[in-house]
Image (cartoon, rainbow, N blue to C red):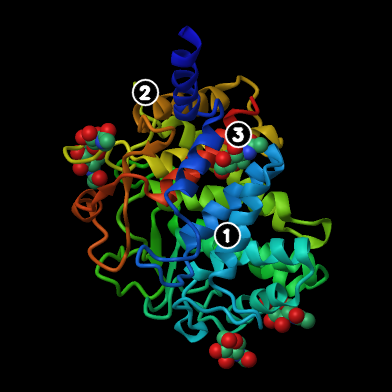
């Protein structure tokens, strides 16, 4: 009698149990909701940088767990946006010259490695050729989009240059022009957006973007930068630094040393910008504690991933352990406050801001007035990446 009663109860408990790894739990939950699969919520093919970020996290998780479910999900998602002949579809138009779609390119290179199928190389070549004719500032910085005349955004470094590096490493490793170009993309962005010690509320970090022609409504008259340090833009840039350094082969010239220097310059002030009480970071980092500002989860998890990976791979010294300590504190806040146990075996993810663009005022009120959503894939993917690093400690 006990047995017949206990068996279904045990099964029910097992079904609702969460995986012990947050990385696995986050990924399985997103997959169960059909997120990041190359389709929009309406089911239309969609080339999306968020899906590219998620696929990057799934690849790392596949390496960690060997679970082929993740491989199959990556393949299915990429097949949804690339025809058999290698044409990229899903609202992608090369001559729109947008950097965002290129973030899915590392997935194509990965699948070319795994399958040897020509379609993936054809698709990657499309993105690579976009970069050859992509509009640039007079200094050589890629515009974030053709419609954003002369503007470099931190976001674009993650979207375009991780792919540019991975492609060059794989197919064009002796192309010194390409290596110098990638190095310049990072350096120009740093030089044009770094806060100066004379700035009010200086953080020693990077403003969201700059307008080389100084004509955008938000452009600072002096250097053309936007007014605020936005956490997610800096998060993209930090992730691009650690991922690109890892991909850079010996033939890449000054790329590695240039990026290491930038990373070592940014890591200590980033550690110091965390809120002392919670350990996480403000949405608008230049105005901590101001009414309307809040702790934002996507940027915070991008920082945890970047800082832990930078220390683990020896890119940034951490003699007193303060960088790892700061990252751990932030991560523990996230699991206690931003992870939601849905009670059905899946988790939800809270407090990620939907968007932050420089297509409007780019000021404090703009950033704090943007919507926050549940299960935003930009934030959840960053949480999976942060978890992968945390779980190695
Ligand atoms: C692999 O991942 C899927 C979900 O993404 C999960 O249902 C399955 O149990 C996992 N398999 C193993 C062997 O862990
Ligand atoms: C590639 O395949 C798609 C879908 O079948 C088709 O619409 C397109 O014309 C093809 N492109 C080329 C260059 O063959
Ligand atoms: C080398 O890279 C440069 C810069 O991206 C590009 O213009 C050129 O076409 C590349 N050369 C080859 C042989 O692909
Ligand atoms: C400096 O930070 C304080 C506190 O967040 C804020 O109230 C103030 O507006 C900031 N000043 C500038 C110029 O950003
Ligand atoms: C998400 O966070 C907001 C603000 O912190 C909170 O009001 C809301 O209840 C949270 N959502 C869930 C489902 O926990």
Label 2 and label 3: CA atoms lie apart by 22 Å
Q: Residue furthest top?
A: 2
Residue 7, percent across and down? 50, 18
Image quadrant in which you'd find residue 294: top left
Disc sitting over residue 186 in the figure? 1
Image quadrant in which you'd find residue 183: bottom right
Disc sitting over residue 62 in the figure? none
**Residue 206 visible within the image:** no
Quick check: 47 above or below 262? below
Q: Which element carries disc 2, helix, strand or loop?
A: loop
Contact (CB < 8 A) between labels 2 and 3?
no
Q: Which residue does the image show at 74% across and 56% down from the upper left?
A: 248
Q: Is residue 192 left or right of residue 21?
A: left
| Residue at numbered disc 3 | 389
Quick check: 2 above or below 381? above
Q: Which residue does the image show at 71% across and 37% down from the upper left?
A: 313
Residue 253, percent across and down? 78, 61
User: Who comes first in sequence, dot 2 or dot 3?
Assistant: 2
Q: Which element carries disc 3, helix, strand or loop?
A: helix
Label 3 and label 1: CA atoms lie apart by 24 Å
Looking at the rendering, the quadrant in which ligand 1 lies is top right
| Residue at numbered disc 2 | 276
């Amino acid at each position: 009698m006990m047995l017949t009663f206990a068996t279904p109860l045990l099964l029910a408990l097992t079904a609702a149990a969460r995986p012990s790894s947050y990385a696995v739990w986050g990924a399985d939950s997103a997959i169960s909701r059909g997120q990041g699969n190359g389709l929009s919520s309406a089911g239309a093919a969609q080339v999306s940088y968020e899906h590219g970020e998620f696929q990057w996290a799934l690849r790392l998780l596949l390496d960690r767990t060997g679970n082929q479910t993740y491989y199959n999900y990556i393949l299915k998602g990429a097949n949804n946006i690339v025809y058999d002949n290698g044409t990229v579809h899903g609202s992608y138009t090369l001559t729109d010259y947008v950097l965002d779609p290129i973030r899915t390119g590392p997935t194509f290179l990965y699948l070319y490695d795994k399958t040897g199928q020509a379609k993936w190389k054809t698709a990657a070549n499309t993105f690579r050729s976009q970069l050859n004719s992509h509009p640039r500032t007079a200094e050589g910085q890629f515009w974030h989009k053709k419609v954003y005349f002369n503007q470099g955004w931190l976001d674009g470094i993650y979207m375009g240059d991780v792919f540019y590096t991975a492609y060059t490493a794989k197919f064009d490793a002796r192309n010194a022009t390409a290596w110098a170009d990638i190095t310049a993309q990072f350096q120009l962005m740093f030089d044009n957006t770094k806060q100066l010690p004379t700035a009010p509320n200086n953080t020693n970090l990077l403003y969201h973007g700059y307008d080389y022609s100084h004509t955008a409504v938000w452009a600072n008259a002096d250097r053309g930068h936007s007014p605020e340090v936005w956490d997610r833009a800096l998060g993209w840039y930090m992730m691009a630094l650690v991922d690109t350094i890892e991909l850079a082969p010996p033939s890449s010239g000054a790329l590695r040393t240039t990026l290491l220097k930038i990373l070592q310059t940014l890591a200590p002030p980033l550690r110091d910008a965390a809120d002392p009480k919670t350990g996480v970071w403000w949405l608008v980092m230049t105005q901590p504690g101001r009414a309307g500002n809040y702790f934002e989860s996507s940027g915070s998890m991008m920082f945890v991933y970047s800082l832990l990976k930078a220390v683990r791979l020896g890119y940034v010294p951490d003699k007193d352990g303060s960088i790892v300590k700061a990252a751990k504190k932030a991560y523990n806040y996230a699991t206690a406050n931003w992870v939601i146990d849905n009670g059905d075996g899946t988790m939800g993810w809270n407090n990620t801001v939907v968007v932050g663009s420089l297509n409007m005022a780019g000021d404090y009120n703009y950033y704090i007035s943007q919507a926050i959503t549940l299960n935003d894939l930009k934030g959840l993917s960053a949480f999976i990446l942060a978890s992968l690093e945390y779980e190695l400690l």
